[in-house]
Image: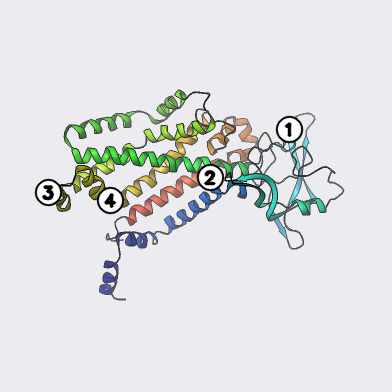
C-alpha cells in the first residue's frame, strides 16, 4: 500500500477507530489492558476462582508457607502435604513436607459453598483440591477423619500463597479482596467524573468571577496534604456504620479530593474551544449555555477525559489501601488488599512470614497496569501526530 493510499484509508476512519489503531501499536498498554481484564474477571467471579472462602479459619494450619504445585502424568496436578511441628524450646512453628502424601488438585472441583452474586449457591471452584480423589487415596501417614472440607477435621494443606495467623488462605483472600480494591477505583472515578466535568466545565465556560472562585477552591484543595486529610475525613465516619456504608464513605472521601486534576484539564480545553466557530454558531441560533457546554464542547475532547480518568484510578486504589492499612478505612471482616496489609505492621511477622506481603505485589501490578494503559491512551488520543 502506498503512502497516499494509506493516508486515504486513514482519512476514512472515525476518531475512535484512529485511537484504537494507534493504541494497538502500544504493546505495553495492550498487555496492561489484558492483565487488568483478567484481574477484573477474577474479581467479578471471586467465589469461583478462590479455592476457599476468604474468612475460613484453619488454626491447625497457621502461617503455612506457600506450596509449589507439581505435575506428574500418573497423578496430574498435586501438592505434597505439609505437617506442622512446634519446637518445644523456641515454640517456633515449622512445616515438614510429606512426599508420600500427595494432595490431588484439579479444575472445576467441589469445595466451600458460596453464593454466586446472590442468585444461587454452588460449590464449584476453578482450581483446588480434588476431594473425591483425596478421600479415595489414603496413605497410612494420613490421619483418618470426617469430611476434609470441614475446618474442624483434618483438612488437607493447599495454600498456593501461604496462610496467615488464623490459617486463612492468602490467595483466596487476595482474590476476594480484589472486589473491593479494584471496584473502589471505578466507583470513585464515577464521582470524580461528575465533579470534575461540572466544576471544570462551568469554570472554563463562564469565566469571570465564577472561574476565579472555582480555581481558588481547587488551589486550596491541592495545597492540603493528602494523607492527613484522608485520615481526618475517614476518622469523621461513625464507628457504628455497617461495612457497606464504610465502603461507600471511603469512596466518596477519595472522590472529594480527586476531582481537581480533571477539573483543570476540562477548564483548559473549554477555554480553547468556547470561541470556536461551531460554539459561536450555537449561541447565535439561541442554544442554551447548558446545551453548548454539555452537548457541543465537552464531547469534543472525550478521549482526553478518558485518559485523565484512567490515570486517576490508581490514586483511588492507593488511597483506599493507605487508609485501610492504617486502620482508618475498611475494617475486618471486610477483605481488601489494604485490610490484608494490616498484618504487615509487625516487622517480626514479616521477617518470619514474608508471604504476608504478597498483596503488595498485586497492588503494584495493578497500579503499573493502569499507568501503562493511561500512557497508551494518551499517545493514542492524538491519532494524527507523528509516531
Of marks 2 and 4, the one in the foreground = 4
Instruction: Bin the neighbour count of mark 2 within 10 Å (Cα to Cα): few under 14, some 14-19, many 20 and up.
Output: some
Which is nearer the N-term, disc 3 or disc 1?
A: 1
CA distance for labels 3 and 1: 81 Å
* Image location of residue 292, percent across then percent down: 21, 47
The outermost residue toward the bottom is 1
The residue at 62%/31% (across/down) is: 348
Residue in the foreground of this view, choosing between 321 and 115: 115
Query: What residue sits right under mark 4 in the picture?
Result: 299
SS label for mark 1: loop
User: x, y (%) of residue 323?
Assistant: 48, 31
Query: Are there few (<14), some (14-19), or many (20+) residues within 10 Å of tag 3?
Result: few
- Classify 164 as above or below 309: above
- Looking at the rendered structure, the secondary structure element under dot 4 is helix
Given the current orientation, which residue lies at the most extreme right position? Answer: 140
Q: Nearer the viewer, mark 3 or mark 1?
A: 3
Residue receiving disc 1: 92
Report how far apart the C-alphas of labels 2 and 1 lie in the structure: 29 Å
Label located before the other in sequence (1 or 4): 1
Amino acid at each position: 500500500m502506498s503512502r497516499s493510499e494509506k493516508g486515504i484509508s486513514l482519512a476514512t476512519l472515525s476518531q475512535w477507530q484512529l485511537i484504537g489503531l494507534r493504541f494497538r501499536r502500544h504493546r505495553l498498554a495492550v498487555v496492561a489492558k489484558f492483565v487488568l481484564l483478567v484481574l477484573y474477571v477474577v474479581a467479578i467471579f471471586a467465589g469461583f476462582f478462590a479455592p476457599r472462602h476468604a474468612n475460613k479459619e484453619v488454626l491447625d494450619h497457621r502461617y503455612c508457607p506457600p506450596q509449589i504445585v507439581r505435575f506428574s502424568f500418573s497423578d496430574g496436578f498435586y501438592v505434597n502435604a505439609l505437617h506442622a511441628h512446634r519446637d518445644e524450646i523456641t515454640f517456633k512453628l515449622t512445616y515438614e513436607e510429606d512426599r508420600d502424601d500427595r494432595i490431588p488438585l484439579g479444575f472445576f472441583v467441589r469445595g466451600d459453598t458460596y453464593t454466586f452474586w446472590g442468585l444461587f449457591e454452588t460449590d464449584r471452584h476453578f482450581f483446588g483440591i480434588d476431594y473425591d480423589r483425596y478421600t479415595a487415596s489414603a496413605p497410612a501417614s494420613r490421619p483418618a477423619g470426617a469430611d476434609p472440607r470441614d475446618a474442624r477435621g483434618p483438612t488437607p494443606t493447599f495454600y498456593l500463597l501461604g496462610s496467615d495467623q488464623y490459617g486463612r488462605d492468602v490467595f483466596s483472600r487476595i482474590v476476594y479482596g480484589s472486589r473491593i480494591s479494584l471496584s473502589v477505583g471505578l466507583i470513585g472515578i464515577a464521582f470524580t467524573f461528575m465533579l470534575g466535568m461540572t466544576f471544570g466545565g462551568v469554570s472554563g465556560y463562564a469565566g469571570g468571577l465564577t472561574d476565579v472562585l472555582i480555581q481558588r477552591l481547587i488551589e486550596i484543595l491541592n495545597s492540603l496534604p493528602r494523607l492527613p486529610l484522608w485520615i481526618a475525613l475517614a476518622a469523621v465516619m461513625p464507628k457504628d456504620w455497617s461495612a457497606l456504608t464504610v465502603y461507600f464513605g471511603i469512596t466518596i472521601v477519595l472522590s472529594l479530593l480527586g476531582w481537581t486534576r480533571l477539573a483543570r484539564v476540562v477548564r483548559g480545553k473549554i477555554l480553547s474551544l468556547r470561541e470556536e466557530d461551531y460554539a459561536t454558531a450555537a449561541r447565535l441560533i439561541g442554544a442554551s449555555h447548558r446545551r453548548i457546554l454539555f452537548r457541543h464542547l465537552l464531547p469534543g475532547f472525550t478521549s482526553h477525559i478518558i485518559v485523565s480518568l484512567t490515570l486517576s484510578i490508581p490514586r483511588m486504589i492507593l488511597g483506599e489501601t493507605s487508609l485501610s492499612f492504617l486502620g482508618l478505612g475498611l475494617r475486618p471482616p471486610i477483605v481488601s488488599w489494604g485490610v490484608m496489609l494490616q498484618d504487615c505492621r509487625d516487622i517480626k511477622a514479616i521477617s518470619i512470614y514474608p508471604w504476608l506481603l504478597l498483596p503488595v505485589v498485586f497492588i503494584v501490578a495493578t497500579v503499573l497496569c493502569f499507568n501503562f494503559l493511561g500512557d497508551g491512551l494518551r499517545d493514542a488520543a492524538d491519532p494524527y501526530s507523528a509516531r
